Image: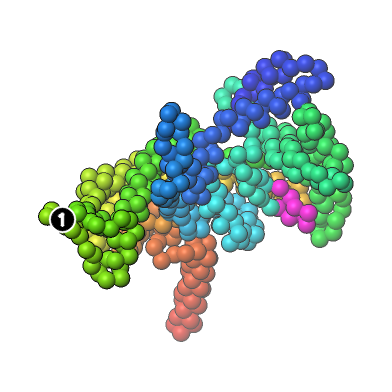
Amino acid sequence: MYITEQDLANLKIQTEGNRQITLILQDLIKDDEKAKADMQAGIEYFDGDHKIKDRKITYIIDGVSTEDLTKANNKIANPFLAYIVEQKANYIAGNPISITPDDEEFAQVFNDARSDKFDELMIDYIRQASFKGYEVLHPFINERGEFDNVIIPAEQCILIYDGKFKRDLIALIRYYLMTFVYADGTEDTRYKVEWWTAEDVTFYVQTKNGDYELDADEPVNPRPHFQISVKSVGKTIDSNGGGWGRIPFIVLKNNTKFQSDLKKIKALIDDYDLNMSDFSNSLTDLQEAFYVLKGYDGEKLSEFVHNLKTYHACKVDGEDAGITVERAEIPHDPRDSHLDRLHENIFFFGQGVDPTNDAFGNSPSGIALKWLFMPMEIKCNGIMRSASIAIKELLWFYAEYMKQTQRKNFDATPNKIKVVFNVNLLVNETELIENCQNSKGVSDLETIVARHPWNTNPKETLLKLKTEVLELAAADSNQDDQNQDDNGGI
């Protein structure tokens, strides 16, 4: 859930004196849990916990519904959401994202500090924003004094935006359950709450009676965002706590409506699960063959089954006596047709790439590949814009960290930072290489290098190219000098 500064102000006006913080947090958390029903569904469906898992087979006698435990109840969950989201996240960030500030020293420092852990974090950041609707990244300074960042689950966060444009994050409330164990061995589960502002964070804990009070486990409460040791020429000169001057949380929105990728396809997935499970139940419950007996002189069906298994025969009497073997047929064509249409619609409305789609042949290339990936590209463009903004904001925090700890001033202005997503698109390599060649003189070298299909490390490639150019220039200069010497000078 996200609210505005004005919403929060109105809530404070409605509450009373000393109980203000308790009433505010109770109302906010209660409303937030209701508002995040769609987000919770996205989490469950990504994990394969679909609606079908709760299904019961029942019968009704005299108006009373009773679960029928004699019937098959196969609960087949088809993880379409997980497939579509993984496809999307790895398409966007499966290859390392190229991040290049105009400030060359800043670019060098940031990329030297960057690790594989950061690239994996970006995939997870996009993945979770996709099935939740948004995700939250928390930049911080760890206990070793290093710049670090971690994903804070969005389901734990209440976002508070400015009241005018609903664009700038002015506060964030994080709440999560903790289990408290007492000396007598009893335990209970209560909320802990963090209220973050642009300068500090205040910690609250829920009491046994449901009220909220300052958390006594925090020695400094409220406390600044960080405690750091400032270094100069390799020596620690002072230690101080401070605030970032803005909320240290970066929100990655899946789209402008904060909707998850499940929203448009949940009903389709539920229908697919239901039909698949019903068909499986029918196969489980159905006997391969059943026998119609006429004039059977035995008293029990069990005797018939015994004779059939033991002697492969049985005795019947009477003029019309006989045994007929019948087989039941399950009409599957209409069901198959319906499942095929559901499968097609899930990928169509989910804007994924269907691996079973044979409309473009076995090896599509060129324009055909573009058409195949176009729906996913359209969907990805929205979150890539949001991810670009988020990455630039992360670099602002890193620049501020370097300013606070190393006394270095780097230019982290957003429009002076270039972010390029090296998407995992199946391509015709020959065609793409030719396009890169033809782009010389039209596009800058950095962009061309980032788009080349063989290039896995644009930064390293650029450095090698610069080195080669310098070496070639030096070699040409030496050759010119040699020629002048051979000709006796000019």
For this rendering, which residue is in front, 301 or 243? 301
Q: Is residue 146 magenta?
A: yes
Q: What secondary structure is the magenta-colored segment mainly? A: loop
Where's the N terminus, which quadrant?
A: top right
Q: Give the residue drawn at x 47%, y 57%.
A: 94
User: Magenta stretch?
Assistant: 140-147
Image coordinates of residue 120 in percent, x first then y, are: 56, 57
Image coordinates of residue 460 in percent, x first then y, are: 53, 65
Residue 416 against residue 455 in the figure, above or below = above
Q: Give the residue drawn at x 81%, y 55%.
A: 231
Image side of residue 336 versus residue 84, left or right: left
Q: Residue furthest bottom?
A: 486
**Would you say residue 298 is visible in this rendering?**
yes
**Would you say residue 262 is visible in this rendering?**
no
Image coordinates of residue 210 in percent, x first then y, are: 76, 29
For this rendering, which residue is in front, 368 or 270? 270
Q: Give the residue drawn at x 41%, y 33%.
A: 60
Residue 382 against residue 7 in the figure, above or below = below
Q: Amino acid at mark 1?
A: Gly
| Element type where label 1 sits in the image | loop
Residue 457 against residue 406 in the figure, above or below = below
Q: Residue furthest left?
A: 319
Q: Is residue 362 magenta?
A: no
For this rendering, which residue is in front, 480 or 311? 311
Q: Give the residue drawn at x 23%, y 64%.
A: 314
Neighbour class for label 1 at 10 Å: few (<14), some, many (≥20)? Answer: few
Circle 1 is placed at which residue position? 318
Q: Quadrant of residue 289?
A: bottom left
Image coordinates of residue 410 in percent, x first then y, are: 66, 48
